[in-house]
Image (spheres, rainbow, N blue to C red):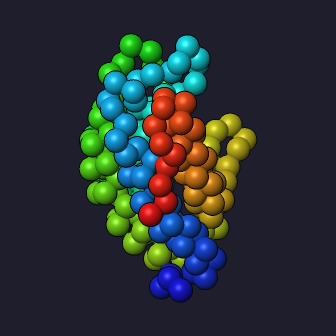
Amino acid sequence: MENVKSTRMQGIVSLYNLQTPFFAFVTENISHEDTKKRLDTKANHIGWLAGALVEQRFDLARHLGYEGHQQADELFKEFKGIQDGVEYPTIASYQADWDKITPILKELLSNVSDEQLERRIDMGPEFSLSLYELITFSIYREANIVGQIALWRRLLGYPGMRYM
């Protein structure tokens, strides 16, 4: 069992720990050229997906009081979508930021209180989420993005993602 301040976070932190190594596993051995490929679709390419995944961890940490940003902040801040004609960073750059934010966010998630989890966060006109709902959605979205990159692996001819 994880040592967490709020028992509501027990499963969340367990999923966080489970999903953390998946970033390296799902991006393993993908060439920088292949991270840019969209295969004649409008789908988000691996370069954007990987950066969005890193940004999500940084964004969640900022909601919990952290003030840092990933190296590619300008490409992802304010929930920017994929941009045509932009050179996205290498997987190695994203991995460095992932490795930086992961222990910081884990500590923040482990120490969040039940009272903090109820704090409302404005997400737009007439729409808000509790911090708990935002954290839960973020953990779900991580799994979703890992799955998208895993599909791209296969579409680009790479072996399936490993889990160990």
Q: Is residue 69 visible?
A: no
Q: In the current view of this chain or complex, which residue is farthest to the right?
A: 126
Residue at image coords 42%, 60%: 21
Task: Kindly indicate the quadrant of the structure image that contains residue 64.
Answer: bottom left
Q: Position of residue 96 (x, y in %)?
A: 27, 50
Asked whether 80 or 47 is in front, the reply is 47
Asked whether 48 or 107 is in front, the reply is 48
Q: Position of residue 122 (x, y in %)?
A: 61, 47
Does 59 appear above or below 102?
Answer: above
Task: Kindly indicate the quadrant of the structure image that contains residue 123.
Answer: top right
Q: On the picture, is 32 further left or further right than 58?
A: left
Does 148 appear above or below 62?
Answer: above
Q: Position of residue 150 (x, y in %)?
A: 53, 43
Does 20 appear above or below 88?
Answer: below
> Which quadrant of the figure contains the C terminus?
bottom left
Residue at image coords 63%, 77%: 8
